[in-house]
Amino acid sequence: MNDIPNKLETFDLLVVGGGVNGAGIAMDAAGRGLKTALVEMHDLGAATSSNSSKLIHGGLRYLEHYEFRLVREALAERESLLCNSPHIMWPLRFILPHRPHLRPAWMIRIGLFLYDNLAKRETLRASEGVKFGPNSELKSEITKGFKYSDGWVDDARLVIFCALEAQRKGAEIMARNKVTSAQRNGNHWVVVVEDQLTGTTKTLTAKALVNAAGPWVSKLFGDALKTKAPKEIRMVKGSHMVVPKIYDHNDAYILQNEDNRIVFVIPYEDDFSLIGTTDVDYTGDPKLATISDEEVDYLLGVVNAHFKKQLTPADMVWSYSGVRPLMDDEGGSAQKASRDYTFEVDAPAGSAPLLSVFGGKITTYRKLAEAATNAICKYFPHAGTPWTKSATMPGGDFDNHASLDKILKTDYPWLPEDVRKRYVRTYGTRSHEILNGLDGVESLGAYFGGTLYASEVDYLVKQEWAVTAEDILWRRTKQGLRLRPTDVEALEAYLNSSSDSDQRVARAC
């Protein structure tokens, strides 16, 4: 008989890591009937999953590295995701300027044709050639190029919606809880977690464990599992910077530098342009990654080589850096490190299984989660079948932004237009959970700046695991771009002084 401590909550599956892969696995597993818990030591999506280029794309440049299977899979996933999450994902056209150092135009056309047709394309337009006239924002010597289609995603909100759906399916979401020990006890795992806000610990048991800790995946083996990792990941830092918008239209740019690296310029939050990314090998704590002066200079150099409007470091209004846990190919440049994924299953006879996820990219998170859950479900004969490919994400049950905007305008005619439009692309139909029962702007509560009011803050704390101003301003809403330091102080005071703050912390944890 196994010596399992009495009166401990036992789960079928415990997922370590609250990024997009971990949240996706928890959602999939809970939807198949497994009693699931998700444990994340920081805020949900606080690391790599909220610091991406925010693109749902096949990865046009991956064709250069002959990663055809990865591109094909990502392109197929792109179609599913755009249909399932219309509030936080939408089509985006990319402009590729052609310059003398690039491949011949005929070769690029062939590559784009392949990109158009590697997987079934239903919602996105095909690629085409374009010419730039004297009114173009590009420098006058750039006269031609190409356009093709990919998609945009609010990466941090994708993680939240996965967690919300996992919770709706019965999963327990434990943000700000760190796994300090995970040891096999026969056919169970005994896992100790420490509350990062209170310092208290508790012990859980699980029949199976998933290590989806992203850039911490290998470290978890030594710290909590007390064993050597079966694979090592390569940590690559990608940095982005935000500047006042460089141009007025809604297309993005993909700029290929003379060193063959790619830099995107993407319309961001209406009034800004998002510039990124870099590929720099990284060591240290992924949470402490920040953009370097060299990265700023590099990104600005690429942009200034293409656009008439010249930028300086003083134009940067915000920056962020994410550490990608890429497959370690033991050599080559960081740029060429594979964005593919794999997972390892360790299941000695008679012992509880462990599945560890290595690598991955946000576009293929659902496919990765499905494959990982399939592998785990081999140990749970009662589990259901895959279901997420056509599943609508929370808040995504509407046709398009215009139709939902019209509904909200009818139901809440007093709601300011800028607030309403942001709610559409932030919450979708879950906007009603913030607005139901309110009857005027004054009923939104305290105003913190931008389009942020107390009613939304209360919703985020009670329903979306937000605890700090950073959670709200930079991951849940992006309103940090618009608030002044005094506004942030007011928000922090509101969060700290509420009479039910203790209940809020308990709910968020």
Image (cartoon, rainbow, N blue to C red):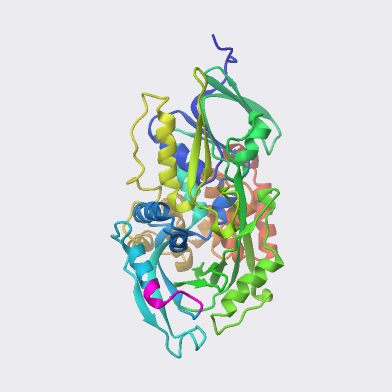
Residue 281: x and y, percent? 65, 55
- Relative placement, left or right, of 434 versus 82 is right
Q: Is residue 348 above or below residue 85?
A: above
Q: Nearer the viewer, residue 70 or 44?
A: 70
| Quarter of the view holding residue 211 | top right
The residue positioned 54% from the left and 75% from the top of the image is 245
- Relative placement, left or right, of 106 versus 505 is left
Residue 159: x and y, percent? 50, 48
Q: Residue furthest top?
A: 1
Q: Is residue 132 above or below residue 249?
A: below
Is 105 covered by the magenta stretch?
yes
Q: Tell me the magenta residue range.
A: 101-107
Quarter of the image containing the C terminus?
top right
**Does residue 176 appear anywhere in the picture?**
no
The residue positioned 51% from the left and 57% from the top of the image is 443
- Relative placement, left or right, of 357 versus 409 is right
**Does residue 113 appear anywhere in the picture?**
yes
Q: Nearer the viewer, residue 456 or 159?
A: 159
